[in-house]
Image (tube, rainbow, N blue to C red):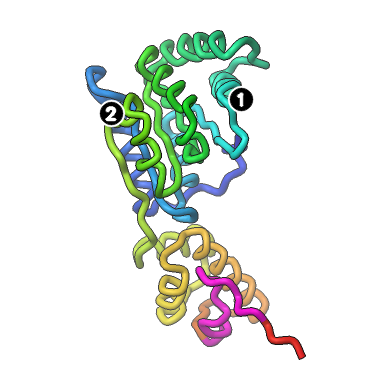
Amino acid sequence: MQDLTKVKKAAPTRNVAAFSALITRVVERDLSLPGLATFYGPSGLGKTKSAIYGANRYRAAYVECGQYTTAKSLLVSILTELGLTRPRGTVAELIAEAIRLMAADISKPLIVDEAHHIANRRFVDVLRELHDKSLAPIILIGEETLPAALEHYERVHNRMLDWVAAEPCNKGDFELLVSSYCPGLTIADDLAREMLEVTHGNTRRIVVNLAKAEEIAAREGLSEIGLGAFGGAVEIVGCRAPTPRRMA
């Protein structure tokens, strides 16, 4: 679980807005409608930043799955987020306790990040059970393959209120990231264009390059930095690995 108070405030990009709209829709839905939803896309598009913003705004419980997450460890994380100190018991007992706590406040959503790690495991149905018996909204966040993986579990798949895809950054998103991560520094149009092209609009890589631009500008005493001062397109951290060096 991340300490949400230490995470830099998310720039209001299209993905942040899309996730905010999704969480609003799920929380405010008619209770006759299903309350599961999925936010998905390739790594680096700002899905987790969007989730953290949503978690703070809606007092959401936020948990993150990993490669070795089990049904029990997931439930313990959920219960801890819901305020239970040192949850204990069998899986069935933990499910019952989570349902009780979630049903007590169905305006408080549960956000399950990195859900692609559990999408191919049978215990993903635990989330369906928590939703069905508590009526609390649950949003899954994961990689591009997450929706397809969930197709194997029809009882989960057919309870999705919506599927929202995270999108690569465009020029407007880039400008918002500049304002958020390096205020006071102007990124010239030529450098901005190259950063967007070389990174393929990947938010994380853009932020890495903005940090690099800020370091160069501070070192050189610049208030504006262009492609030349940055070192050219070759210095932009992009989607390709560095070319292997030829050693003498």
Task: Please tell me whether residue 208 is drawn above or below residue 154 in the rendered image.
Answer: below
On whether residue 48 falls in the magenta region, the answer is: no
Task: Please tell me whether residue 174 is drawn above or below residue 123 in the rendered image.
Answer: below
User: Observer-nearest residue: 93 or 15?
Assistant: 93
Residue 73: numbered disc: 1
Q: What residue lies at 41% left-to-right and 26% top-to-bottom?
A: 109
Which image quarter: residue 18? top left
Q: What residue lies at 43% left-to-right and 11% top-to-bottom?
A: 104
On whether residue 236 falls in the magenta region, the answer is: yes
Q: What residue lies at 59% left-to-right and 39% top-to-bottom?
A: 67
Q: CA distance from mark 2 to mark 1?
A: 25 Å
Secondary structure of the residue carrying tag 2 is: loop
User: Observer-nearest residue: 184 or 10?
Assistant: 10
Instruction: Assign the N terminus to one quadrant of the image.
Output: top right
User: Is there any visible trace of residue 136 in the rendered image?
Assistant: yes
Q: Position of residue 23 (x, y in %)?
A: 35, 34
Which stretch appears magenta?
228-244
Closer to the chain start, of discs 2 and 1, is 1
Amino acid residing under circle 2:
Asn
Q: Position of residue 126 (x, y in %)?
A: 46, 21
Amino acid residing under circle 1:
Ser
